[in-house]
Image (cartoon, helix red, strand yellow):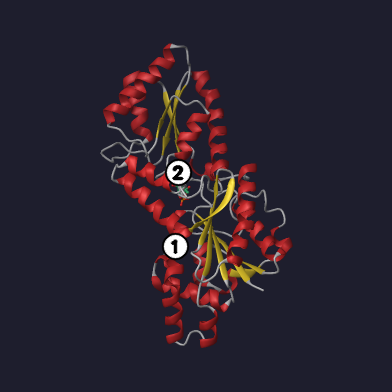
């Protein structure tokens, strides 16, 4: 009988509760004991009451709930070795055999570092007399698994992260609302959306709401280029009788000299060059709130079931898995590889090598 802990980490995402629910119930179904680590890595570092056994009825109704009911945090201590040492001790004290982390690339990077450091952490605990030799022998390996929860959809090796489609839905609804007032006043709106360094939310919401222009980090251009192009397109749409203008800007949008393109920059161009009455709407955390859409409930549930199965099948020699979705099928990928690839894509984007970034992203799906 294994003790399997689940934790949510980083920015909350709709569907995280559905993931926790599926993990808790699948673990029980397979004769294991599920635990929840409250408040993400911060709870892992603190231990004690932050690690609680979960029962079937504890997660009743969690399928539809937004946010994460076991809490999350962006934890500084865990980025340092002393924090990870105390997390290691707390897991051993609670008798946890496997840890499933639902979070974004930062959280899964943390999980991967923790796993690779585990042998030296337990050795240090043994040498300091903080764990018995019996516990040391029993907890030789950290069995870890990642399920990707983030609204940003920025992780390699999966087509979709848990929460991304809910967030996309929220953004589209907000733009639909904005459309009405934009049309009424014949105004322009610059809508700023989240996504950190990834333009997926901006690109997909722009596409789904027929925005006039979209600015994303993955396609930077010179200031002159994007400004001229945007003005030309908006003017063309206006000359055909379109009364409203919507420009979607990803929060990470950059020009090709790597300077950020802000909503204010976009507004200034629309006002100064086209004379449009323009407003900025920064959607902010509304994009992360609310219940999960059906796709995220389904994705989170299937990934939770697969995660439990994966930790039960993992041997000390199996690389830690990350659960993703590829062409509508739930897949297991090596966590370390997915993390490494995601970082390489970010580095390629930072160095403006977009072709390489796209090739790297695609390589995540070649067998
Ligand atoms: O990673 C999810 C995300 O919502 C990003 O899109 C955004 O940049 C960031 O988190 C906001 O973080 P916080 O909630 O800590 O302000």
Nearest to the observer: residue 165 or residue 312: 312
Residue 127 position, x and y percent, is 42, 86
Can see residue 35? yes
Q: Separation of disc 2 and disc 1 at Cα?
A: 20 Å
Residue plotted at (30% across, 33% down): 221
Residue 362: assigned label: none
Residue plotted at (52% across, 65% down): 144
Density class for disc 1 (Cα within 10 Å; few <14, some 14-19, many ≥20) is some
Image-quadrant location for residue 59: bottom right
Residue plotted at (39% across, 68% down): 80
Residue 166 position, x and y percent, is 58, 42
Q: Is residue 36 left or right of residue 284?
A: right
Can see residue 196? no
In this picture, is 314 found above or below 157? below
Nearest to the observer: residue 104 or residue 303: 303
Residue that numbered label 2 is attached to:
195
Sequence-earlier tag: 2 or 1: 1
């Amino acid at each position: 009988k294994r003790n399997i802990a689940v934790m949510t980490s980083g920015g909350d995402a709709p569907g995280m509760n559905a993931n926790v629910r599926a993990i808790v119930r699948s673990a029980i179904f397979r004769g294991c004991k599920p635990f929840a680590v409250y408040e993400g890595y911060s709870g892992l570092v603190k231990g004690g009451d932050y690690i609680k056994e979960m029962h079937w009825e504890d997660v009743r109704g969690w399928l539809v709930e937004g946010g994460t009911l076991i809490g999350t945090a962006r934890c500084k201590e865990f980025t340092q070795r002393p924090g990870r040492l105390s997390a290691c001790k707390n897991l051993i004290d609670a008798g946890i055999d496997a840890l499933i982390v639902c979070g974004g690339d930062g959280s899964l990077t943390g999980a991967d570092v923790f796993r690779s450091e585990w042998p030296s952490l337990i050795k240090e605990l043994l040498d300091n007399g903080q764990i018995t030799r019996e516990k040391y022998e029993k907890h030789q390996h950290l069995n870890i698994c990642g399920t990707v929860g983030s609204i940003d959809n920025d992780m390699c090796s999966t087509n979709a992260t848990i929460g991304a489609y809910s967030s996309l839905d929220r953004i589209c609804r907000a733009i639909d609302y904005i459309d009405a007032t934009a049309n009424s006043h014949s105004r322009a709106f610059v809508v700023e959306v989240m996504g950190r360094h990834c333009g997926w939310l901006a690109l997909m919401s722009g596409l789904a709401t027929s925005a006039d222009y979209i600015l994303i980090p993955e396609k930077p251009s010179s200031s002159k280029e994007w400004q001229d192009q945007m003005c030309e397109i908006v003017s063309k749409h206006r000359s055909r009788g379109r009364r409203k203008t919507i420009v979607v800007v990803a929060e990470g949008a950059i020009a090709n000299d790597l300077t950020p393109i802000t909503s204010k920059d976009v507004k200034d161009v629309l006002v100064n060059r086209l004379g449009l009455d323009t407003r900025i709407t920064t959607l902010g955390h509304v994009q992360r709130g609310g219940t999960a859409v059906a796709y995220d409930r389904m994705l989170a549930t299937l990934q939770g079931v697969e995660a439990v199965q994966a930790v039960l099948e993992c041997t000390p020699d199996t690389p830690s898995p990350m659960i993703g979705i590829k062409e509508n099928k739930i897949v297991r990928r090596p966590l370390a590889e997915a993390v490494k690839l995601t970082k390489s894509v970010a580095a390629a984007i930072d160095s403006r090598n977009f072709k390489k970034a796209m090739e790297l992203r695609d390589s995540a799906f070649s067998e």
